[in-house]
């Protein structure tokens, strides 16, 4: 008899799978599983769902000796275990009230109706206890056993005649404990498997996105209209199972990899209506089959049957689209949409960063040109005046100065490299200094104390503006001039360069103003420009360090990382 009851109830287990599926679709339930905050409205919804599941368990009962042998507790206890005492109590009230209103199994109506409420509350407190524990299915089975024991005790208390209640409890206690404990355990195993599989798929998708990002980053930063974008499409196509991957700008196809037709050749104008729609609305589109009227394969064997299209943006402005194709109709899944969304956002971010980086380089070049233009006119006029005065009294000196002047301007005009050798920069400084010494004669002394075989690479026009500032603003205001020292030493993996003068010094307030990013004063453009370019090239810690005392002089320290290859400068930043 016991076996017959167990088998009879086991046949009702099919509703467990249906219920597990319904629960997995509810956002409020997913928040419970993810341990996210759940609103009161969500708790009320879950209480209703679990209560209805308890009612369903009642309707799937087996009548036995005037009682209903059922799986009602599975729904109520699940609500309590997952939602806590509030959800458990309310689900129990819903299912218990229903049990008290039906005529079938009237012998145990009161006992079962009352016990259902307290069983839900007990399961709620059990849920609080096991909230952070593993293997919840074991505790679910224990909860089922306790709940069924509570119900049987309730039957003994409220059902009469007492002798019949005792006989009923003896007959059904074990099978109901077994079937409901097993059912609760099985339901929690199903729920855990559903969410663990989703988490696993999400982790795999995130890992794939990161791998694609790692492989495509060097190319996507070049811009959507560069030739490198084709490599991005090829990488994505190779690393995924899509039949084709495509990029467009706002007018034409800029990259396409994988299967395709003549209509999808790189360089051709955009001809598909859905692509234009994404460009206009900035909203993604998922299509299950080819609907383009002009497609020659529309009605038979189109190699690009399904597609998901996402917009690509720069600063929230749509600049193109990213497409993933499959060759089978209605083949785009939610996972494909999430992957396309993640990649489109990642590509949009990199395109924006690439644009900002490009503009930053243009700005640095413009500032360098402005610095060169600032130096050239006054310096050229003063130098030519000195050379003109020497032509008669010291022709050899004049010729030497002309050579130095040509070296200075040749280097200024050819400063289109990001990095140059220290030796080249020092030669530039020396040519400039020779011309200034001819102008100011005994008022200027420049000493070079550079370690032998000291070499590194640094941005052009790094030292010359600093030496010029030392001469113009440090020494010349003094009646008798002074001395500038250019010192270079090596410390570990860095070259340390000091530019020191014994001039008038700089007031602390003025020095702060000079080094301010907002400062655009022309007399300090050289120092500020050098400081910004050093930090932009090598990193924040490589900015200028300036120590100045009024009446005693100024010392500027530069730290240059020793880089063997120019490409390494990005890594040092």
Image (cartoon, grey):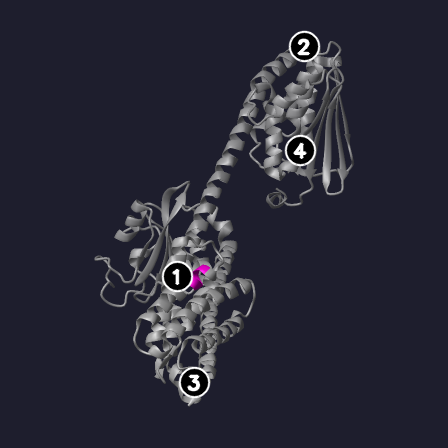
- Residue marked by disc 2: 392
Q: Position of residue 177 (x, y in %)?
A: 47, 79
**Tag in front: 3 or 1:** 3
Disc 4/disc 1 C-alpha distance (Å): 75 Å
In the rendered image, which quarter is residue 70 located in?
bottom left
Magenta segment main secondary structure: helix
Q: Considering the numbered disc 3 on the image, is that residue within a helix, a strand or a loop? A: helix
- Could you tell me how far apart the alpha carbons at marks 2 and 3 are, in whole angstroms? 138 Å
- Magenta segment boundaries in residue numbering: 86-90
Residue mark closest to the camera, 4 vs 3: 3
In the displayed structure, does residue 427 sit left or right of residue 525? Answer: right
Q: Which residue is mark 3?
A: 163
Above-or-below relation of 94 to 218: below
- Circle 1 sits in a helix, a strand or a loop, which is it? helix
* Camera-side mark, 2 or 4: 4
Q: Does residue 395 appear in the picture of this structure?
A: no
For label 4, the SS is: helix
Taking the spot 33% from the left edge, 55% from the top edge, the residue there is 265
Q: Distance between the Cα atoms at labels 2 and 4?
A: 32 Å
Q: Residues within 10 Å of mark 1 (few under 14, many from 20)?
A: many
Q: Are marks 4 and 3 in contact (CB under 8 Å)?
A: no
**Quarter containing the C terminus:** top right
């Amino acid at each position: 008899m016991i076996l017959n009851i167990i088998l009879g109830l086991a046949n009702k287990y099919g509703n467990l799978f249906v219920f597990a599926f319904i629960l997995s679709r509810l956002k409020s339930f997913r928040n419970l599983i993810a341990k996210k905050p759940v609103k009161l409205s969500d708790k009320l919804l879950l209480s209703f769902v679990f209560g209805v599941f308890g009612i369903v368990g009642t309707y799937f009962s087996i009548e036995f000796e005037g009682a209903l042998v059922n799986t009602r507790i599975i729904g109520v206890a699940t609500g309590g275990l997952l939602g806590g005492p509030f959800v458990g109590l309310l689900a129990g009230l819903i299912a218990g009230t229903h049990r008290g209103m039906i005529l079938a199994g009237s012998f145990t109506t009161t006992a079962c109706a009352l016990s259902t409420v307290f069983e839900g509350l007990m399961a709620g407190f059990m849920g609080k206890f096991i909230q952070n524990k593993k293997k919840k299915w074991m505790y679910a089975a224990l909860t089922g056993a306790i709940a069924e024991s509570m119900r049987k005790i309730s039957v003994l208390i409220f059902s009469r005649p007492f002798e019949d209640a005792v006989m009923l409890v003896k007959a059904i206690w074990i099978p109901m404990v077994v079937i409901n404990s097993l059912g609760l355990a099985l339901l929690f195993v199903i729920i855990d498997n559903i969410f663990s599989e989703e988490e696993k798929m999400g982790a795999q998708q995130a890992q794939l996105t990161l791998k694609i990002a790692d492989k495509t980053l060097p190319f996507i930063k070049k811009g959507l209209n560069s030739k490198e974008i084709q490599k991005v499409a090829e990488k994505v196509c190779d690393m995924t199972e899509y039949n084709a991957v495509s990029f467009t700008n706002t007018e034409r196809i800029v990259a396409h990899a994988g299967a395709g037709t003549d209509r999808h050749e790189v360089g051709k104008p955009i001809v598909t209506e859905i692509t234009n729609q994404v460009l206009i609305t900035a909203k993604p589109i998922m299509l299950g089959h080819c609907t383009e009227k002009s497609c020659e394969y529309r009605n038979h064997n189109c190699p690009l049957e399904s597609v998901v299209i996402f917009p690509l943006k720069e600063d929230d402005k749509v600049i193109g689209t990213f497409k993933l194709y499959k060759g089978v109709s209605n083949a785009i899944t939610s996972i494909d949409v999430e992957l396309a969304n993640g990649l489109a956002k990642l590509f949009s971010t990199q395109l924006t960063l690439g644009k900002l980086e490009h503009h930053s380089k243009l700005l640095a070049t413009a500032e360098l040109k402005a610095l060169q233009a600032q130096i050239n006119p006054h310096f050229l006029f003063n130098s030519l005046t000195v050379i003109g005065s020497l032509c008669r009294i010291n022709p050899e000196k004049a010729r030497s100065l002309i050579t130095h002047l040509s070296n200075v301007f040749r280097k200024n005009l050819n400063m289109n490299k990001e990095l140059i050798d220290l030796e080249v920069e020092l030669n530039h400084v020396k040519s400039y200094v020779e011309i200034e010494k001819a102008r100011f004669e005994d008022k200027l002394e420049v000493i070079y104390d550079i370690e032998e075989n000291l070499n590194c690479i640094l941005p052009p026009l790094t030292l010359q503006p600093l030496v010029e500032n030392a001469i113009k603003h440090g020494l010349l205001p003094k009646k008798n001039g002074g001395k500038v020292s250019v010192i270079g030493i090596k410390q570990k993996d860095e070259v340390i360069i000091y530019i020191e003068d014994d001039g008038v010094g700089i007031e602390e307030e003025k020095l702060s103003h000079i080094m301010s990013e907002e400062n655009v004063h022309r007399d300090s453009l050289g120092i500020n420009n050098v400081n910004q370019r050093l930090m932009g090239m090598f990193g924040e810690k490589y900015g200028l360090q300036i120590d100045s005392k009024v009446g005693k002089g100024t010392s500027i320290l530069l730290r240059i990382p020793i880089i063997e290859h120019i490409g390494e400068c990005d890594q040092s930043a």
